[in-house]
Amino acid sequence: MRSDYKGVWTALSETLSSAKRHVSGTEDEAIIEQSGIGTSQFLLNHVGINPTDVVLEIGCGIGRVGKCLAPLCRRWIGADVSPHMLRHAAERLREFLNVEFVELSGTDLHPIADNSIDLVYCTVVFMHLASWDRYSYVEEAMRVLRPGGKLYVDNVDLCTDGGWAIFQTHRRFPIAERPDHISECSTPQELQEYLKRAGFEAIEASSGPELVSVWGRKPAPDREDDLSL
């Protein structure tokens, strides 16, 4: 069942080779490394990461992006539903002393404390989630972020030619043969609406050839309000 995220992704990641294929579409380490660098650079350029930040990745997989970001922040937390993914990521990031790993249930961030994170990001994960569960993670990000903290999410963009091609390819699967992890697209409006409804501000979006990226900030208390408390 598609909604059994833990069961689906634990089964798909029993070996490192299988985990690589299902996370990155390849086992080629050079391609995986370049992909991680590209995502990390986008985050740095558009969202920003400070050396003092505590950073949380929802759906960290094999640590493709975490390997690039861990050296740039105070603490990096990789969260995933699959214990196998977490094991692979821990091995790949073993050189870093500022990383930790958290196993998720599949729809929430309950192991993470309120107001404890500076940046939450979730990349190439929403495509595998139902819309309701996408929004649940956005709400949970609002809970765990410190005031002024930032959230980044992305998905395949239905409104681009590249995204539409993926949509058309996947719709050709007979219903009974659709893989449980098959990608489902979003529109920019959908992702922006999630952040808006959850209470984020300064929401921005960027569309590439296939992906739409959306990010925003958790409101911080007004300085005058702080002084009056």
Image: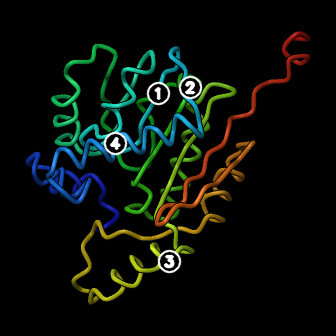
* Distance from the alpha carbon under mark 1 to that under mark 4: 16 Å
Q: Position of residue 158 (x, y in %)?
A: 52, 74
Q: Dot 2 surroundings within 10 Å: few (below 14), some, or many (20 or more)?
A: many
Q: In the depicted view, which residue is nearer to us: 213 or 105?
A: 213
Q: Is residue 114 shown above or below 136?
A: above
Q: Which residue is label 4 attached to?
A: 36
Is 10 placed left or right of 107 in the picture? left
- What residue would you read off at disc 1? 55
Q: Amino acid at mark 3?
A: Asp
Q: Residues within 10 Å of mark 1 (few under 14, many from 20)?
A: many
Which label sits on residue 95?
none
Disc 3 crowd, CA 10 A, few/some/many (<14, 14-19, 20+): few
Q: Residue at x 26, y 54 (%)?
A: 24
Q: Nearer the viewer, mark 2 or mark 3?
A: 3
Q: Is residue 169 above or below residue 12?
A: below
Give SS at disc 4. Answer: helix
The disc label shown at residue 161, or none: 3
Asked if labels 1 and 2 touch by Cβ distance under 8 angstroms, the answer is yes
Q: Amino acid at mark 1?
A: Val
Which of the image's four quarters has the C terminus?
top right
Sequence-first tag of 4 and 2 = 4
| Marks 1 and 4, the one that precedes in the sequence | 4
Tell me the residue that label 2 is attached to: 118
**Residue 190 coordinates in the image, percent (x, y):** 62, 64
Residue drawn where x is 46% and y is 38% of the image: 41
